Amino acid sequence: MDEDEYRKTYQQITELQCVFEKALCSLRCNCSQGEMFRLADRHGVTCKNADSQQNCVALLNHLRSQTRFVFKINEIDGPFPHNKEIRVQNGGLLGIQKLLDGDASTEMVADVSSVVATAVEKYGSVENLPYDQIMPSVMAFKARPKRRNKK
């Protein structure tokens, strides 16, 4: 499939794009409002709830803003490079879940939408989250190691 055709079809499928798509596709997070799909040989996630999606957009933008200094990125308009974006999404969501649950051993986010809604309810808005307590989870997050081909 041609890359331009892929992007066009992807846009048609995803009326509301899940901004935490990388986290959901990494299989470290689930979301009751996300619906996974396959297009060609790739996975994608669309959001089923506009309000949830707006909360997630606001949260991800704040997570990126808070981690720019840590990642030594001066300016960026949009997603970080892939590996850093994975760390921001997964580590940020895990950090928020740990903050809400008090359970530091959790390695999976059961429902992104619920975690975001609970955090907004508890702290009033995504701007008020204690990012100083969330950032250690972002920095500590390790992506899965690359598979090595056995010959």
Image (tube, rainbow, N blue to C red):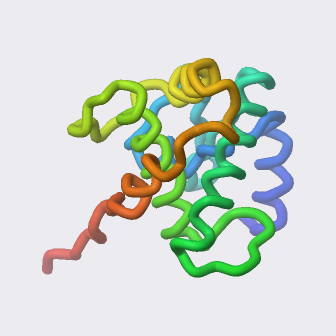
- All told, the count of numbered labels is 0
Q: Quadrant of residue 41?
A: bottom right
Quarter placement of the C terminus: bottom left
Q: Is residue 130 above or below residue 65?
A: above
The front one of 122 and 73 is: 122
* x then y, percent, for residue 15: 83, 35
* x then y, percent, for residue 31: 53, 27
At a point 42% along the width and 27% down the height, the residue shown is 100
At a point 61% along the width and 22% down the height, the residue shown is 117
Q: Quadrant of residue 45?
A: top right
At a point 62% along the width and 70% down the height, the residue shown is 68
Q: Is residue 114 above or below residue 2?
A: above
At a point 36% along the width and 35% down the height, the residue shown is 98
* x then y, percent, for residue 29: 43, 37
The front one of 142 and 129 is: 129
The front one of 139 and 53 is: 139
Quarter placement of the N terminus: bottom right
Q: Quadrant of residue 57?
A: top right
Q: Is residue 78 above or below residue 115?
A: below
116 lies left or right of 110: right
63 lies left or right of 11: left
* x then y, percent, for residue 2: 76, 68
